[in-house]
Image: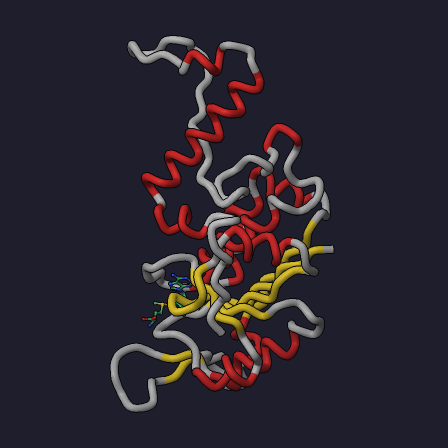
Amino acid sequence: MWRASVLTIFPDMFPGPLGESLAGKALAAGTWLLDAVDIRDFATDKHRSVDDTPAGGGPGMVMKPDVLARAIDATATDARPRLLLSPRGAPLDQNWVEELAGGAGVVLVCGRFEGVDERVIAARDLEEVSIGDYVLSGGEIAAMVLIDACVRLLPGVMGAAESSAEESFSAGLLEYPHYTRPQLWEGRGIPEVLTSGDHGKIAAWRRAEAERLTRERRPDLWARRPGSQTRPARPK
Ligand code: SAM
């Protein structure tokens, strides 16, 4: 069964939003497993310290390699990928999410403070993953983003009504626009083709809109769409 183990100094943040909606129902049904591991349980001093001052000086604190390594060794006892949430990591995208969702699960290490001692990243072979070019105060919300994106792809989690087949990124394109009733709202109508009942024309319109939006909003995705060029490898 797909399992997410999250190493954190804030285990009470979990499941948090992952306990609601699609992911929450699937968690309650046992479709996937979640364990939040408290890194402080692996500290050895009476203050349960997990951080120390940076070598070389400067502001903030750094997560200690010895404590974190003990937490990883006790948790990552199988072949699941070990990922460190990090703003300097390779960007998470839908292809990577699909790869992770297709495996046995993930071991996620959440940084705090200024980050993690570099030696534990190397010694425990942690792959760094970023959820975007901005800085969060900790890796927990980033871990939730990654887990949510994976869990919704697990077999049985999304019903036919929420199928991922036509979603943004599924064909390297952003998704086409959606409309629902009322037919006329604040003077704005629904594109005529969508009420024509002609499924061929509707599919062609949706494809053309998806291509137009991708070209306009995400020229980077447009350039990398399947057939245009191969996806660049993730930096190691
Ligand atoms: N000093 C670090 C830097 O400048 O890159 C930022 C550390 S941040 C305050 C603390 C932790 O939040 C990081 O160790 C990481 O686990 C998490 N984090 C912050 N931004 C993130 C992002 N964009 N993606 C993934 N994790 C992030």
Q: Nearer the viewer, residue 205 or 110?
A: 205
**Relative to 40, residue 193 above or below:** above
**Residue displayed at 34% across by 90% down:** 55
* Picture quarter with ligand 1: bottom left
Q: Nearer the viewer, residue 205 or 71?
A: 205
**Residue displayed at 52% across by 49% down:** 227
Residue 114 image offset from top left, x and y in percent: 35, 74
Q: Nearer the viewer, residue 176 or 181?
A: 176
Q: Dividing the picture into quarters, in which one does residue 54 lie?
A: bottom left
Residue 100 image offset from top left, x and y in percent: 61, 58
**Residue displayed at 51% across by 10% down:** 196
From this viewpoint, is residue 157 visible?
yes
**Relative to 111, residue 171 above or below:** above
**Residue displayed at 32% across by 39% down:** 216
**Relative to 107, residue 32 above or below:** above
Q: Dividing the picture into quarters, in which one does residue 134 lie?
A: bottom left
- Which image quarter holds the N terminus? bottom right
